[in-house]
Amino acid sequence: MTEREELEKGFLRDELLDHETYAELAAGERNKEIRDLLQKLSNKEREHIGVWRKLLGSAGDSVGAPMGLGFRVFLLSALRRTLGIAFVTRLLERDEGRGLERYKEGMSGNTLRKTDKTYLKRIIKDEQEHELAFASKVERYGGELGYTQSIILGLNDGLVEILAVVAGLATVATSSFIVVIIGLIAGISGTLSMAGGVYLSSKSQGLVEEEDGERRKSKVLPSKEGYYTGIYYFLGALIAVLPFLGGLQGYEGIIASIILVSAALIVASTIIAVISGTSIRKRSLEMLAISLGAAFATILFGTFAKLYFGVTI
């Protein structure tokens, strides 16, 4: 197999995956506007499939249904239900952007033939239109991203703050029950504080935003933002406390809590990276460094207090 055929097969696999994904998502989408867009994009990707099959000829016969399609559709559908239209369209926009970059790399290289690049130019134009289509839907349903950000804000803070609390407590506590009680008290306090703070902050903006010199109502409700922030703060607190609820004590509980919190932070950081268009890896490493650094500091303080001052509770 030539290098050109391998590259074109990769393009064909990408188009097959996108075509099937959009078709499956469209079949289960209740919002007519989004459903029509997904179906339109699915049809366009099918045209691209025809182009690559034509260029590959018999060499493309072995390229069939993409692997991982079922899981991808399941994941996107689950995200659609939990995080809303805006987040999923942002995720699809990001995916289209990556596909567009791969096509541009193909144009700039010397692997493809001149005829292939002629077709590729047309496909690139279509892919740019797809990216813009998703971007316009994100803008239209942008208010939902505000709620998603509130969810992640609350979850992040609950994870980081309560992990630091339980990590410090566990070094001086004589039972897991003490860590659970104090951790939950801190979690409830933080929940009320975060929910109230976000509500007042959002309300103080006057429920309006400036855009092109005109005042218009904000797309998010302060009460809903505060609710989501508070609920997910408490969820983050529960995740941090969970190992101690299971009866673990001391450093065993701390290690288990760190593992659970780290996993949750990676998920939360991925969501924020998708929304902001930043690097998932960079965002995840930043959040892990902050949370683990805070936990490590409180572990050192608790250990010092126990060894040198005999503090136990």
Image (cartoon, helix red, strand yellow):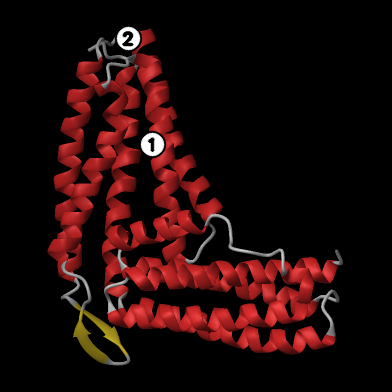
Residue in view at x 30 percent, y 14 percent: 172
Pick the residue in front: 110 or 15: 15
- Residue with the mark numbered 2: 309
Q: Is residue 189 above or below residue 147?
A: above
Mark 1 belongs to which amino acid? Val
The image position of residue 271, as x and y in percent, is 41, 57
Q: Secondary structure at mark 1?
A: helix
Pick the residue in front: 202 or 221: 221
State left or right for residue 251 relative to residue 11: left
State left or right for residue 137 relative to residue 43: left
The image position of residue 52, as x and y in percent, is 70, 78
State left or right for residue 24 relative to residue 84: right
Q: Quadrant of the C terminus?
A: top left
Q: How many marks?
A: 2
- Residue with the mark numbered 1: 261
The image position of residue 45, as x and y in percent, is 56, 79
Residue 135 is at least partly visible in this image: no
Q: Which mark is residue 114?
A: none
Residue in view at x 33 percent, y 33 percent: 163
Q: Secondary structure at mark 2?
A: helix
Q: Quadrant of residue 165?
A: top left
